[in-house]
Structures are given as structure tokens and as C-alpha cells.
Amino acid sequence: MSFEIVKEIFVKNWPMFLRGAWVTLYVSIISTIIGTVIGFIVGVIKTAPNPKNAVSRNILKVVKFIFTVYVEVIRGTPMMVQAMVFFYGMPLLLGIDIPPLMSSIIIVSVNTGAYMAEIVRGGIISIDKGQFEAFDALGMSYIQGMIYIIVPQVLRNILPATGNEFVINIKDTSVLNVIQVTELYFQTKSLAGANFRYFETFLITMFIYLIMTFTVTRILRFMERKLDGPANFIMSGNQMQVQTPEVKPFEE
């Protein structure tokens, strides 16, 4: 292997690498956003207190059970298997033929939602119980208290874990090549099969993945620092400042 070979492969085939990287980022971004929304819905409902009404309480128990099964099934099976079952199972079971790219977004979103649900649930549980009692004492409903008091704190607490899920999605999209999604790994495999330079071709892909994940990590760290605010600050506001009258020397 020489640097010249690596350079030649990249110069001649950079549009393929670029298209593959774009599909990888596109699927990862959209799926992480949708998965986070799913995770918040599931996580909030799973931590909701049981209502006093018997009918509402039973309905909530059924919904919680369904969400628990969803989380356990998705977390307990590999995403590659989920992709195969969904992509090839939908035409057989429902007669619906979903394109590979749309299928990949659905698969990664559902997978991300299961993991984010547990992350959100943990974030809600970590909030001090006194805050729940506080919004209840103020006459706020559970939904109002979650929206205005709890969720903003949970968002900040789970930001590192959400960023980690985003990075994982960037790397895990490589398994979607089994359903013919033309992401970065698929493009690299096709190119390496054509030029028989597997090591050099996948070395380029490794650095592309590294650049994408490193960039995402830096952006998320920047967002965390912005949310944390300045390290040193001066409290000011409605504080009364009492001026001591000037004392003049005694004159005879």
C-alpha cells in the first residue's frame, strides 16, 4: 500500500464517497430527530402517574405494557435483523412495498426511539420529586408541569446521551446495506469490489466516518457549553443598595 494509491482512489471516486456520506448523514439526522420525539412520548407516558379514574388507569396500563414490549423487542434484537424483517416482511404481510431509503429511516427511527425512551425515562426519574410536588401544589396539571418545568431540565440532562445516539446512528447505518440502501458502506463495498483494493478503499471510508462523528461530537459539545452558560457570573437584580451618608468632620 502507498499513499499514492489511496489518493488516486479518492480523486477518481470522490463523488461516490460524497453520495454515500450524504445518504448516511441524511438517514442519521432525520432518524435521530424522529427517534427522539418517539422516545420522549414513550418515556413521558411510561413515567406518568396512574390517574384516579379506573377507566383511564386501565387504559394507561395497557399503553405502558405495549410501550414496554416495544422497547424490549427493539433493544433485544439487532438492527440488521430488524431491517431484513421490515423491508422484506412488509410486502408479504401487508402488500406494501416501501423504498429502501424510506425503509431505512423508519427502521433507524424506531430503533432510536426505543433507546431514547429509556434515556428520557431515566432523565425524568433523576429530577427531584420536590419539583413534581411543586407544580402540583401550584395547581398545574401533569402535562403542564412536564412541558414547562420537567422537560426543559430533562432536555439538558439527556443531551450527551442524545448526541451519543446520533453518533451511533451514523455508524450503524452501515448495516442498512443489506436492504440495498446506497449509504457510505454500500458505496465503498461496491467500489472495492470493482477495483480489488479493499484495504485502501475502506481506509478512506474509515476516515470519512471519523470526520463525520468527530464533527458531530464537537458541535454537541459546543451546544452543551452554551446551555450551561458562563462558568462565572455576578448575581444582580432587585437588591437594595444602601448608601451610607457622608460624615463631615466636626467644625467648631
Image (cartoon, rainbow, N blue to C red):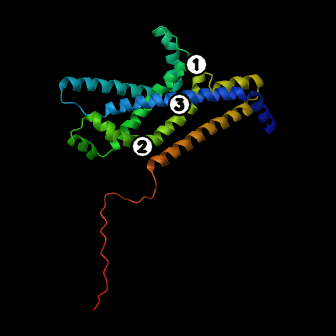
Question: Circle 1 sits in a helix, a strand or a loop, which is it?
Answer: helix
Image position, residue 127 (x, y; %): 33, 44
How far apart in space, not on screen, are marks 3 and 1 (Cα)? 19 Å
> In the image shown, does 167 or 196 lie closer to the viewer?
167
Check whether the beta carbons of the residues at disc 2 and disc 3 lie within 8 A of each other.
Answer: no
Q: Residue at x 31, y 27 (%)?
A: 64
Determine which of the numbered discs, if any, sits on residue 29 in the image.
3
Q: Amino acid at mark 2?
A: Arg
Determine which of the numbered discs, if any, sits on residue 179 in the image.
1
In the image as oriented, which residue stretches furthest toward the top? 95
Q: Which class describes the residues within 10 Å of circle 1: few (<14), some (14-19), or many (20+)?
A: some
First in residue order: circle 2 vs circle 3: 3
Question: Circle 2 sits in a helix, a strand or a loop, which is it?
Answer: helix
* Closer to viewer: mark 2 or mark 1: 2
In the image as oriented, which residue stretches furthest toward the bottom? 252
How far apart in space, not on screen, are marks 2 and 3 (Cα)? 19 Å
Asked whether the viewer can see residue 184, the reply is no
Q: Which class describes the residues within 10 Å of circle 3: few (<14), some (14-19), or many (20+)?
A: some
Q: Residue at x 49, y 49 (%)?
A: 225
Residue 208 appears left or right of 77? right
Q: Residue at x 59, y 38 (%)?
A: 213
Q: Which class describes the residues within 10 Å of circle 2: few (<14), some (14-19), or many (20+)?
A: some
Determine which of the numbered discs, if any, sits on residue 156 in the image.
2
Q: For residue 191, what is the image quadrant?
A: top right
Q: Amino acid at mark 1?
A: Ile
Q: Residue at x 62, y 25 (%)?
A: 183
> In the image shown, does 237 or 156 lie closer to the viewer?
237
First in residue order: circle 2 vs circle 1: 2
In the image as oriented, which residue stretches furthest toward the front? 252
Image position, residue 33 (x, y; %): 47, 30
